[in-house]
Image: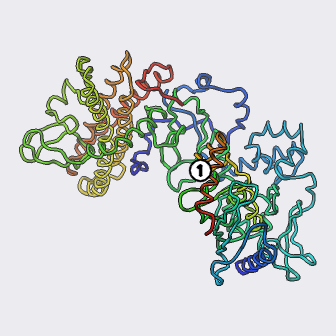
Amino acid sequence: MQAGSGKRITKELGEIQSDPPEGMKVTLKDDSDLHTWQIVMDGPEQSVYAGGHFKLILVLPKDYPFKPPVVNFQTKIYHPNISNDGKGSMCLGMLRTDEWKPPNKIVAVLNMTRNLLIEPNPDDAVESSIAEVYKNDYKSFEKTAKEWTKKYAVGK
Amino acid sequence: MDSDDEFHSGQSSDDFMIDDDSDTGLPEDDSDIDEVDIGFESQEKITKPGRKSYEVEFKVYSPQDIQSYQDKQIDEVSTILGQPPEITAILLRHMRWNKERLIEQYMDAQEQMLENVGLDQDIAGPPRIETKKNFMCDICCDDQPGLETFAMKCGHRFCVPCYKHYLSRKIKEEGEAARIRCPGEDCNRIVDSKSLDLLVATDLKERYQELLTRTYVDDKENLKWCPAPNCVYAVDCGVKQRDLLKIVPTVHCDCGHNFCFGCTLTDHQPAPCALVRKWLKKCEDDSETANWISANTKECPKCRSTIEKNGGCNHMTCRKCRHEFCWMCMGVWSEHGTSWYSCNRYEEKSGSDARDAQAKSRQSLERYLHYYNRYANHEQSAKLDKDIYIKTEKKMSQLQNSSGMSWIEVQFLEEASRALQQCRQTLKWTYAFAFYLARNNQTEIFEDNQKDLEMAVENLSEMFEKPVDQLAKLKVDMLDKTTYCNKRRVILLSDTADNLKAGKWEFNVELTG
């Protein structure tokens, strides 16, 4: 299966590069390492992150696809589900070990991530203070999120 | 604090009762208890005469017992539901082994239930490994012809190596057993035991069984694993969480470990679980101070020589100036042994200086240290007593040679040592108990009992330090003192347990279950 995992990853990478999901550029960080992917995700038009370009690193564990990939935002982002600790880690739904199923695809992970930018999930937040603002004072959430996008995710 | 567990947990025979009426060794299904709701009061009725008030009814089970009890239940329910055992097992685990509720819900809405646990009605036919034409595994993307594949009834088909790897990961790394789902996307079907048998290697099957047994015990309120390292036994006890403010259910595992069924900490009678939690938290918070006070050295109150305590007895004699004093209160020893033994009692200061906030906080620290000192001291002494015993054990064989006593005849040392360990464990917790106790009519009796037990223990502990060649002469005396220690312990525990049950203790903090 270890050999099979290479086959599977190559296949997924090929599919994603020939038909990339909306608003994303996917490359290998280093051509010799199939397990570390680099993604540039455009802030979806209808979201508060519009105009920004967010860098993500997706790491496939050795035992992929039996273990879920790990996704980190390298660009700072104001979002209830993405940690604001310099790591930019994201832990949601299908990415949890007990939820992940081996046939799940990376493209689904990326689409889920994009959907999360459009619609945050404050009930399952990593940053509970941001989740509070999102729920109780959306205006102020929107303002900060746009400021951060401008500051960290535009023109870089 | 746990290092001496395996040691002091040996039982003196009169100290607790093993269930003498246990017939098959297996309990009747307890699910009816959930409905009848036998509270603590009604439990009194089934308490047999001869059981002391601080003892609870319990049974110890081996993994085999648990396995066979599980199997028996599965067979029983399997007949009622008309489902094969492996399906019944999944259903029972899903319902957390509540047989009645399972049968009821199954009869009401069979299809709904089978769907809930990921089983549909089409469950005939054994699982098979097959090869399919034009197949590509969705996990590894392998598509070579002749690839062995497997799918359960849900039809999510993957190659056998991937399926096997998926299952072994779940079992080995994630410790899952009862609720492993089909690897298919969004499929909640649970992998049944027949499919597992087909795909899982023999060594993993054992682990799988172990995990299943584990979930069984975890699911049952009346079963708990013995927390001792490497112990494989589970204990069955009817005491419920809500009873824990009224009883301290210490149980004795067959491995020799004594633990509380309520919180699984090492035996902490007479203090109830809620109090123990508060105390341990407090000791942790105040650990800096606690560290300081638990330092092993003190100065001789007369000549100021530094003294390290190297035995369990509190009767200290300074090597230098021959001053005899009590290690705990540093008072002159001669005032202890006879009429006045105030070492266990904290004299509450008069209320007048309570107005001064600073004095108050110092006083509360002092009060805490008073009890903590004694608590820690008994813990420490128990360890030292044990060290001495280990040394003595070696000399027991020498004693046999020199005095012509047989092995059986020198066993009194072991009995004495056990009594010491157990009594110190109890004494230790009496100080945590006393710290939270508010004064009322019962406290004086409690303190007297504490004092008596403490004195009995110190007397016995002191004998333990005598040179080996004198031990033979002391046998009768030592046996008497051992019996007396055990007796004092029973008296103290009975009194505290009776009052706890009757709600007669008042605490200076609120205890919540």
| x 89%, y 38%: residue | B107
The residue wearing badge 1 is A127
On the rendered structure, is A88 left or right of B455? right
Residue B261 position, x and y percent, is 54, 39
Q: Secondary structure at mark 1?
A: loop
On the rendered structure, is B282 left or right of B197? left
Farthest top residue?
Answer: B441
Residue B131 position, x and y percent, is 89, 76
Neighbour class for label 1 at 10 Å: few (<14), some, many (≥20)? some
* Along the viewing direction, whichever of B407 and A17 lies nearer the viewer: A17
Q: Is residue B177 visible?
A: no
* Along the viewing direction, whichever of B284 and A130 lies nearer the viewer: A130
Q: Is residue B65 visible?
A: yes
* Along the viewing direction, whichever of A106 and B405 lies nearer the viewer: A106
| Quadrant in the rendering for residue A40 | bottom right
Pointer 1 indicates a residue of which chain? Answer: A
Farthest bottom residue?
Answer: A32
Give above or below for B247 relative to B2: above
| Quadrant in the rendering for residue B169 | bottom right
On the rendered structure, is B433 left or right of B472? right
| x 39%, y 38%: residue | B282
Residue A28 position, x and y percent, is 67, 78
Q: Quarter holding the C terminus of chain B?
A: top right
Residue A25 position, x and y percent, is 72, 72
* Along the viewing direction, whichever of B355 and B420 lies nearer the viewer: B355
Give above or below for B261 relative to B90: above
Query: Which color mode does the image show?
Result: rainbow
| x 75%, y 50%: residue | B71
| Quadrant in the rendering for residue A71 | bottom right
Numbered label tally: 1
User: Residue flagged by tag 1: what amino acid is it?
Assistant: Glu
